[in-house]
Amino acid sequence: MLDFSIITNAPIGFFVFGILATLLVAISKAGFGGAMGALSLPLMLLALPPSLALSVLLPVFLLCDFYVGWKYYRRAIRRIVIVMTLAACLGQVAGWLLYKQINAEILMFIIGALAVFTAVRYFWRLYRPVENAGLARAALRQVRRRIDRALGWMGLAGIASFVSLTGGIPSQIYLLPLNLPRAYYVGTMGWSFLLVNLAKLPFFVELGLFDTASLSASLVLAVFVPIGLALGVWLNRAMNDALFYHISHGFLILLGAKLILQANIW
């Protein structure tokens, strides 16, 4: 039975911030691989308490992930997806076990600082002659050398994803240096997010984060998902790989700065 108490208790805030968050998630996942979706939780927190915001947004994330997985299924590089997913799932187990002990503020600050550093380094290297891998097969050759890197970044992504739905930022830090063509980047990131978010469901259920009210609110927001997905696909097709990476790293700086400012550790 549907329960719309969440919406009726905060109708203006829910529709304004909930719809904006939903569109942001959908555009980000379909167009840029999903990292900008990290902005969706702060938007939802303007209308809902943290645990409720997490439970409302996760089904929206999954709906977008299923579409991206279907849309780009021929573009996902399986070896990279497997490495990313396994490492992130290990991180999620750690996040579940330490859910009440993890200091979310410190975690956000660390992720934000690393994101800014990674993006600044990217733009600095634009002015230096570097070898351009540029192709999916070149990325495949790097996978074995980057397994240790995946365990670190994707493990952190798993923890961050479970605690605050910000796992896209460490995932982006890991995947962007592989220089995949943009469709392969979105497809690989999309499948990884889909598997990781599916693995997250039992933990959310065990913690009691889902109920009829949160699922009803998610159902209302799902109406706006196709609009964001269509815009995201259009944006991905409208740009070339170079512009895609410039924009993605630009957003990485903004996201990192947001997390640093949001973290109340001073």
Image (cartoon, rainbow, N blue to C red):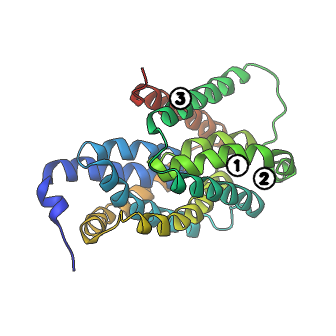
Q: Would you name the residue on which mark 3 appears?
A: 253
Asked which secondary structure carries label 1, the reply is loop
Q: Would you name the residue on which mark 2 appears?
A: 136
Residue 68, given in percent of the width and then of the height, sits at 54, 63
Q: Is residue 250 left or right of residue 20?
A: right
Q: Residue at x 65, y 57 (%)?
A: 90
Check disc 1 and give the amino acid type. Pro
Q: Would you name the residue on which mark 1 appears?
A: 181
Check disc 2 and give the amino acid type. Ala
The reply to whether callout 2 and callout 1 are in contact (CB within 8 Å) is: yes
- For the N terminus, the image quarter is bottom left
Residue 184, given in percent of the width and then of the height, sits at 68, 55
Between discs 2 and 3, the one toward the N terminus: 2
Check disc 3 and give the amino acid type. Ile
Distance from Cα at disc 2 to Cα at disc 3: 25 Å
Q: Residue at x 57, y 38 (%)?
A: 248
Q: Is residue 72 left or right of residue 212?
A: right
